[in-house]
Amino acid sequence: MSFPLRGPLLAAALVLFVQTYTTTGFADTADEKFSSPAAREAIAESVSAALQGDSRRAVEALKAVPADQFAGEDARYRGCMIDRFDGASPVELVHATGDTHVDEVLRLYQQYWWQALHDPERLQELDGALKRRLRVLLGKPAADWNKLEAVLARRLRERGYHAQLGRTPPLRELMVWRTQDSKLYDVALPEGSYRVRVELLDDFVSRGWSSYARCGRGSSGGWATRDRLYAVMPWFEGDLDSDAFRASLLGHETQHLADLSRFSELEPWELEYRAKLTELWKARDSLPALLAKFASSQSDDKNSPHTYANRRVLSVLRDRLQEQNVTSTQPDLGDVPPPTLRAAAREQLIEDSSQRSSEAGPPAQAER
């Protein structure tokens, strides 16, 4: 999952990504049954590199394993990633709408994503180039990103599209969808409960840079602002009763909402770290896949909040379990009894909150 960044604030009307992704959940439709172990490992490395904003490393991991070792959806992913990112320039527009203005916005962002993923070290320069091109397209409104994106969102809305903008670290974000509904949920968290409003989003023409960077293999499942959640319904295949929706959307994103109101200075990776602990606590059927996803997408880069938080979560939980004489031999902690793991995740979140008590108010129990 994800949350947007606007200046000093975490949240806005723009993830994530997320996200989130989870991450923070990102969906994964890989047909691992017929791909070789080497191919599966290459895909994990590729996805992790893509989420860290590095398409060249993502492609190199895939090309290191012969194509005949990939099958089904894995083979499609490998082919798409090489076609999309192994050339000298971006390929054709993905998901054209037929609306000239909307398609030009999509084209500007996809060109920016391709260049930023290909040359991460040029990110600041490319951010500036995107801003200049958007100002020309929109008639040169103010150069401030927030004001510029407000104009862009309004123009898209006039054409029947909703948009999420801002930055989902490390890149500028653009999610665009046509339909939106609203629903209230009561969500239990480890330290209290929330009544939250969830916007259910569907009919997407852009699911953001994290989807583009992985050829649609996954995307942000949703994000939180200071007063509501947003759910990317294709990520959950429209199933509002699924364990993934309950844990990875309602649990993860409501923890963001609670933390945004309770703590004032959390870094993006800290928000993700805390939300992932709540997600593990709430997960039941989705727990094995969630742990595997965390283990396959890790990094030491705080500028990639999801992958950094994945590593942090697994590390601190392993240490806590060892203190309780619970030993795991698997990288994803998959051999730990689920109730034991969920309890450890809850305990870790509560301990983390206690350590931040000097800047925290009471645990949130709010109606939104």
Image: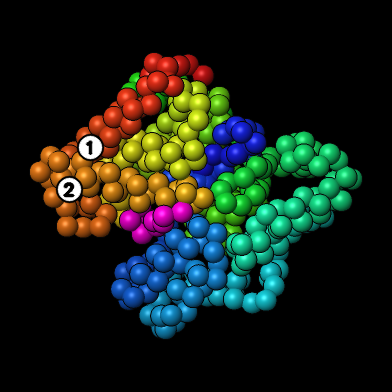
Q: Residue at x 50, y 26 (%)?
A: 264
The residue at the far right in this view is 139
Side of 135 relative to 204 (left or right)? right
Image location (x, y in percent) of residue 291? 30, 51
Q: Residue at x 63, y 48 (%)?
A: 173
The amino acid marked with disc number 2 is Val
Q: Residue at x 64, y 36 (%)?
A: 6
Q: Please, is residue 350 above or below residue 122 in the view? A: above
Image location (x, y in percent) of residue 290? 34, 49
Closer to the chain start, of discs 1 and 2, is 2
Q: Which mark is residue 35?
A: none
Image location (x, y in percent) of residue 161? 71, 42
Side of 145 relative to 177 (left or right)? right
Side of 12 relative to 70 (left or right)? right
Q: Please, is residue 265 above or below residue 88 in the view? A: above
Residue assigned mark 2: 336
Q: Which residues are magenta?
A: 293-301
Asked whether the residues under the numbered discs 1 and 2 touch, taking CB atoms below 8 Å apart as contact, a structural biologist would say yes
Q: Secondary structure at mark 1?
A: helix
Residue assigned mark 1: 344
The amino acid marked with disc number 1 is Ala
